[in-house]
């Protein structure tokens, strides 16, 4: 017997327990029949129109994404709006949609842990432990094998991310040596208190707004250490590294159940920004 969508959902729920999600979040199977046969699984950060079209064209029976399509309540999924249009495309294309969002952020082997290991951090622990499982939780804190300059760490981070128009923004002395870091893929300026409590050299995150970032730097300079320095990247790019290992876990889990599936990680970063320009004068 081949795999089913429901078997994949069961494995994904075991890897990224829904109980770890934030209260405001919505995760799990969005649309699709659990009894449907599963041969191909596509993966992406965002369920955009382009991603859905590409997944269906490839013949995906299931699309696994990080960001929810229907995070906030809707009154209609009519094809007259883009979210309803996506749902209709999925149903017509016999492609189920599954979301692993903040539960995947917090899970062991999840989004934060993947990026932390990618940049070389060791002895990881959650930045904010989950109440239900202190080994899981938001973000990760760890240390590098050897100190590197802030600029070198930023360059390493940039090399690991897919192409995007954001790049890596640096706040701090680029020549300063860093060894300890806190990592939070996705929007991270709400956790500065936890980062300061962790006493790390650098905070790697995304979506840093002007005032929280500026106040964090002012507080660091006032304290005399200048730390934590900040590395700010594209929101979607910071979460992309999780897709490949998560896809591999699903393949392995289904093989244990006696089923084989194909997977495809769609290399698309759904940033809204398509280009950037800047002044060249000093």
Image (cartoon, rainbow, N blue to C red):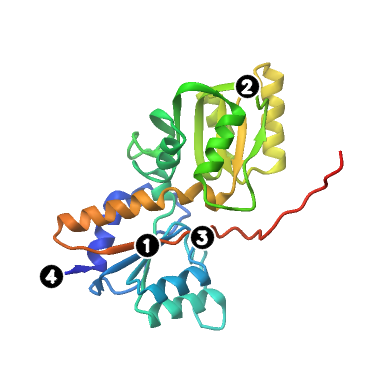
Q: Is residue 96 above or below residue 144?
A: below
Q: Is residue 210 visible?
A: yes
Depth-wise, is mark 4 or mark 1 nearer the camera? Answer: 1
Quarter of the picture containing the C terminus is top right
Cα–Cα span, label 4 and label 1: 22 Å
Image location (x, y in percent) of residue 123: 37, 26
The residue located at (70%, 32%) in the rendering is 215
The tag earlier along the polypeptide, 2 or 4, is 4
Residue 213 horizontal/vertical position (percent): 67, 36
Spot occupied by residue 32 in the image (x, y as percentages of width and height): 33, 73
Q: Which residue position is annotated with label 4? A: 1
Question: First in sequence: mark 2 or mark 1?
Answer: 2
Residue 176: mark: 2
- Local packing at callout 3 (Cα closer than 10 Å; few below 14, some 14-19, many 20+) is some
Residue located 57% across and 28% down the image = 202
Q: Quadrant of residue 28?
A: bottom left
Mark 4 secondary-structure assignment:
loop
Vertical position of residue 120 compared to residue 37: above or below: above
**On the image, numbered disc 3 is attached to which residue?**
268
In this rendering, would 215 be left or right of 58? Answer: right
Residue drawn at x 39%, y 56% as measured from the top left = 100
Q: Which residue is mark 1?
A: 264
Give how far apart the Cα atoms at labels 2 and 4 are.
57 Å
Instruction: State yes or no: discs 1 and 3 in contact (Cβ < 8 Å).
Output: no
The numbered mark, 4 or 3, whose residue comes first in the sequence reads: 4
């Amino acid at each position: 017997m081949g795999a089913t969508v429901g078997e994949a959902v069961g494995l994904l729920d075991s890897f990224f327990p829904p109980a770890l999600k934030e209260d405001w979040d919505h995760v799990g199977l969005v649309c699709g029949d659990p009894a449907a046969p599963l041969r191909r699984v596509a993966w992406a950060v965002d369920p955009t129109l382009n991603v859905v079209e590409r997944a269906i064209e490839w013949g995906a029976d299931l699309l696994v994404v990080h960001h929810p399509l229907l995070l906030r309540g809707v009154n209609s999924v009519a094809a007259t709006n883009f979210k309803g249009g996506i749902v209709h495309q999925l149903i017509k294309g016999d492609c189920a949609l599954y979301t692993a969002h903040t539960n995947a952020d917090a899970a062991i082997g999840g989004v934060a842990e993947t990026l932390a290991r990618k940049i070389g951090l060791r002895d990881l622990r959650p930045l904010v432990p989950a109440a239900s499982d202190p080994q899981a939780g938001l973000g990760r804190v760890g240390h590098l094998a050897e100190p590197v300059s802030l600029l070198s760490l930023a360059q390493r981070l940039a090399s690991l991310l897919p192409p995007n128009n954001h790049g890596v923004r640096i706040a701090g002395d680029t020549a300063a040596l860093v060894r300890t870091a806190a990592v939070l893929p996705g929007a991270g300026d709400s956790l500065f208190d936890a980062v300061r409590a962790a006493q790390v050299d650098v905070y790697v995150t995304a979506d840093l707004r002007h005032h929280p970032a500026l106040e964090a730097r002012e507080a660091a300079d006032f304290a005399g250490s200048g730390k934590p320095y900040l590395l700010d990247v594209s929101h979607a790019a910071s979460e992309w590294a999780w897709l490949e290992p998560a896809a591999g876990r699903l393949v392995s889990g289904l093989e244990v159940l006696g089923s084989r599936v194909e997977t495809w990680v769609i290399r698309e970063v759904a940033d809204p920004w398509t280009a950037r320009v800047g002044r060249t004068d000093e």
